[in-house]
Amino acid sequence: MLLFLSVTSLVFAAQYYSYTAKSIQTGLVILPLGDVNQDRIVDTYDLYRVARAYWSKPGDANWDPDCDLNGDKFVDTIDLTLVADHYGESV
Ligand SMILES: [Ca+2]
Ligand SMILES: [Ca+2]
């Protein structure tokens, strides 16, 4: 059986299960949703980064695109809640 998945469908499927797929130079890795610093665990370091980027948008001094977890170009309570909801998860 030939199975073909596009990166988009893989990301969607991964997010459905509370994980996010990130493409890096060495390949595709699966990270827990909320793992801002991509060390495969959602912890205080991720909360700290989102807190530093809180209430920012592209162009602001504290903008950090990795902290915009829902991709709406704004770091706010939704992004902070995503980290809090997945706190302690790891892969
Ligand atoms: Ca992390
Ligand atoms: Ca956001």
Image (cartoon, rainbow, N blue to C red):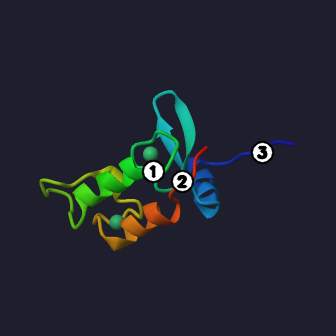
Q: Position of residue 65 (x, y in %)?
A: 30, 52
Q: In this figure, which residue is indicated by the disc labeled 1?
A: 43
| Quarter residue 55 falls in | bottom left
Name above or below for residue 61 compared with residue 1: below
Q: Residue at x 57, y 53 (%)?
A: 89
CB under 8 Å between discs 2 and 1: yes
What whole-number distance in Å separates the C-alpha atoms at marks 2 and 1?
6 Å
CB under 8 Å between discs 3 and 1: no
Quadrant holding the N terminus: top right
Locate ligand 2 by image quadrant: bottom left
Give the left or right position of residue 48, taking residue 43 as reference.
left
Q: Amino acid at mark 3?
A: Leu
Identify the residue at the far right of this view.
1
Q: Position of residue 43 (x, y in %)?
A: 45, 50
Q: Earlier in the sequence, mark 2 or mark 1?
A: 1
Q: Position of residue 4 (x, y in %)?
A: 72, 45
Q: In this figure, which residue is indicated by the disc labeled 3?
A: 3
Q: Earlier in the sequence, mark 3 or mark 1?
A: 3
Q: Amino acid at mark 2?
A: Gly
CB under 8 Å between discs 3 and 2: no
Q: In this figure, which residue is indicated by the disc labeled 2?
A: 88
| Quarter residue 47 falls in | bottom left
Q: Position of residue 35 (x, y in %)?
A: 46, 50
Q: Amino acid at mark 1?
A: Asp
